[in-house]
């Protein structure tokens, strides 16, 4: 075990030095030194508690999910009844009290209508989402089940979490923490973000894009009074435009089929615009809508506000369109990001906001470094005083362990949090555990009368088994923390796992190489340990 050929020494030093050099840019950054731009610059990302940034708590309302499901079911029912052969005529449609009810013109169509609707009442899961009742032999009432609502809320929050993640990724931030909290809340932490207001605006934007036909029969006086014709609704213009218009409530196109969105400038009017593109299905719907309504105005609606209502001069085919509406370059870019990342399935409101200043993070780093320094000096003094030369080897291994740990974290783009600094301090204390076990075992072997080389070889061999077993269990615990923890807990787990690996490598493999080289060169008859 003490045989180290040249190729093995070179390979071990290559790994050690490479990982250690990767730590230099991060150390230079902490020291306030400029790192040469011509050299690679891997950095350890700092978490919210160290770099400062924004903490937001977003919440969705269950009532919004209920309302959306009700609207979707109404549109589905109308399409099913319209597409039946022969057509099933309905009237007196109501969504009052959270229920969808409608009257059939012909009571004989009850069984046919029930047969068309029932397959849509159960979603992809085994949960029954709707209950159907027939009242007075001619009216059908659809009610949402609580199990169906709960499943819809859970699905909506899962989708919303992914949409939030994509939007933040578009901002170019690194290592955000985005997790669900409870049934209807999402925690968002973005380290290093300098503009939390922009983040709130971006995440608060539902980005529900709709194209609906304008109701030309609506009287201006009724629109001003908020009275919409049957089958239509009043939608206000976006801020700065003023007024409102009436649009057909059903039959439009939603932006669910968008495949891309880019901010740009209209070369003719020099306006800021957003260019959107649909997939094949969405492009076909858009082409059909514009082909059937040439010469009529249609409203472009974003989150319940009309951006613009241009006339359809000709069919728009090819799946591409432009959105205009008094955009600035920044607002056009934010809208493009929101549309690219997908619409939120439910509106999210900011219910809690905290901002962590970088000064607090810098103070945490200073105190963490102080704790590491004091801990390191205490450990070094104890090891050298107790084990002499072997303690010096353990000290060198300890320094290399810290450098390698930082270097690997920088290479992997991992995030260092305040609990991660605590993990660093713990790693320093635990890093010499392996050397204590080895040195004590060598002492025992010398006390039994073994020669120097035999005692050292047996000490490393026998102690290594216990070291591997103990550290393997710690790695398993760290993996569990990383898999099931979140935020700061994951930061601690990352440092713990990497620190265990590097400490075993430096404390066992490197010190064995140091000791083997010294024994081969000095050939001592006795050792002091």
Image: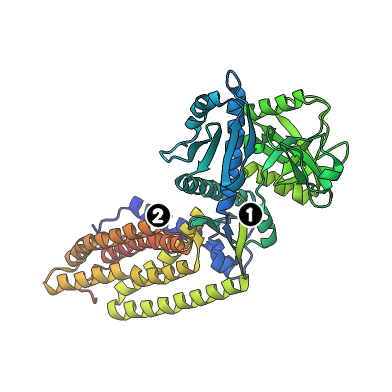
| Side of 440 relative to 109 (left or right) | left
- Most distant residue in the top direction: 86
**Label 2's element?**
helix
Nearer the observer, 521 or 5: 5
Quadrant containing the N terminus in the rendered view:
bottom left
Query: In the rendering, at what x and y percent does residue 114 appear?
Result: 50, 29
Q: Quadrant of residue 352?
A: bottom right
Give the residue number, with chain letter if any, for mark 1.
Answer: 38
Give the residue number, with chain letter if any, for mark 2.
Answer: 483
Whether label 1 touches label 2, CB < 8 Å: no
Nearer the observer, 39 or 418: 418
| Side of 431 relative to 63 (left or right) | left
- Mark 1 and mark 2 lie on one chain; the one further toward the N terminus is 1
* Label 2 CA crowd tier, 10 Å (few <14, some 14–19, many 20+): few
Residue 421, relative to residue 513: is it above or below? below
Residue 301, relative to residue 138: is it above or below? below
């Amino acid at each position: 075990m003490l045989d180290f050929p040249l190729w093995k020494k070179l390979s071990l030093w290559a790994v050690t030095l490479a990982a250690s050099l990767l730590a230099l840019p991060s150390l230079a950054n902490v020291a306030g030194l400029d790192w040469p731009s011509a050299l690679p610059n891997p950095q350890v990302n700092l978490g919210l508690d160290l770099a400062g940034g924004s903490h937001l708590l977003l919440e969705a309302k269950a009532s919004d999910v209920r309302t959306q499901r009700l609207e979707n079911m109404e549109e589905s029912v109308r399409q099913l009844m319209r597409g039946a052969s022969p057509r099933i005529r309905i009237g007196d449609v109501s969504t009052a009290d959270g229920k969808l009810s409608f009257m059939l013109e012909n009571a004989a169509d009850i069984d046919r209508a029930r047969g068309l609707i029932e397959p849509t009442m159960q979603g992809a899961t085994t949960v029954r989402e709707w209950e159907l009742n027939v009242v007075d032999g001619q009216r059908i009432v659809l009610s949402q089940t609580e199990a169906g609502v709960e499943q819809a809320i859970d699905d909506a929050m899962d989708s919303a979490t992914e949409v939030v993640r994509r939007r933040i990724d578009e901002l170019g931030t690194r290592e955000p923490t985005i997790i669900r909290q409870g049934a209807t809340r999402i925690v968002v932490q973005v380290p290093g973000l300098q503009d939390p207001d922009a983040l709130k605006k971006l995440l608060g934007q539902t980005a529900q894009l709709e194209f609906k036909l304008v109701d030309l029969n609506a009287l201006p006086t009724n629109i001003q009074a908020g009275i919409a014709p049957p089958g239509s609704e009043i939608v206000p213009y976006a801020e700065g435009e003023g007024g409102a218009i009436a649009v057909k409530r059903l039959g439009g196109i939603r932006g669910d089929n968008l495949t891309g969105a880019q901010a740009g400038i209209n070369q003719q009017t020099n306006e800021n615009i957003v260019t959107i593109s649909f997939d094949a299905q969405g492009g076909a719907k858009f082409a059909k809508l514009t082909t059937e309504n040439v010469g009529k105005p249609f409203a472009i609606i974003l989150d319940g506000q009309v951006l613009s209502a241009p006339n359809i001069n000709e069919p728009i085919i090819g799946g591409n369109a432009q959105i205009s509406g008094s955009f600035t370059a920044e607002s056009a870019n934010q809208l493009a990001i929101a549309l690219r990342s997908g619409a939120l399935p439910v509106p999210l409101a900011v219910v809690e906001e905290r901002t962590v200043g970088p000064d607090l993070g810098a103070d945490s780093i200073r105190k963490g470094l102080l704790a590491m320094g004091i801990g390191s000096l205490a450990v070094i003094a104890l090891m050298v005083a107790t084990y002499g030369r072997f303690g010096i080897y353990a000290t060198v291994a300890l320094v290399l362990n810290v450098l390698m740990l930082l270097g690997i974290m920088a290479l992997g783009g991992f995030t260092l949090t305040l609990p991660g600094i605590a993990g660093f301090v713990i790693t320093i204390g635990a890093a010499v555990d392996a050397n204590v076990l080895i040195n004590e075992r060598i002492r025992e072997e010398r006390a039994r009368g073994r020669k120097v080389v035999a005692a050292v070889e047996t000490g490393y061999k026998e102690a290594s088994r216990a070291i591997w077993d103990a550290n393997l269990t710690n790695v398993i615990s760290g993996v569990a923390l990383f898999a099931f923890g979140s935020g700061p807990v994951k930061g601690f787990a990352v440092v713990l796992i990497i620190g265990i690996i590097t400490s075993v490598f430096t404390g066992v493999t490197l010190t064995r190489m140091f000791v083997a080289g010294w024994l081969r060169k000095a050939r001592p008859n006795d050792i002091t340990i």
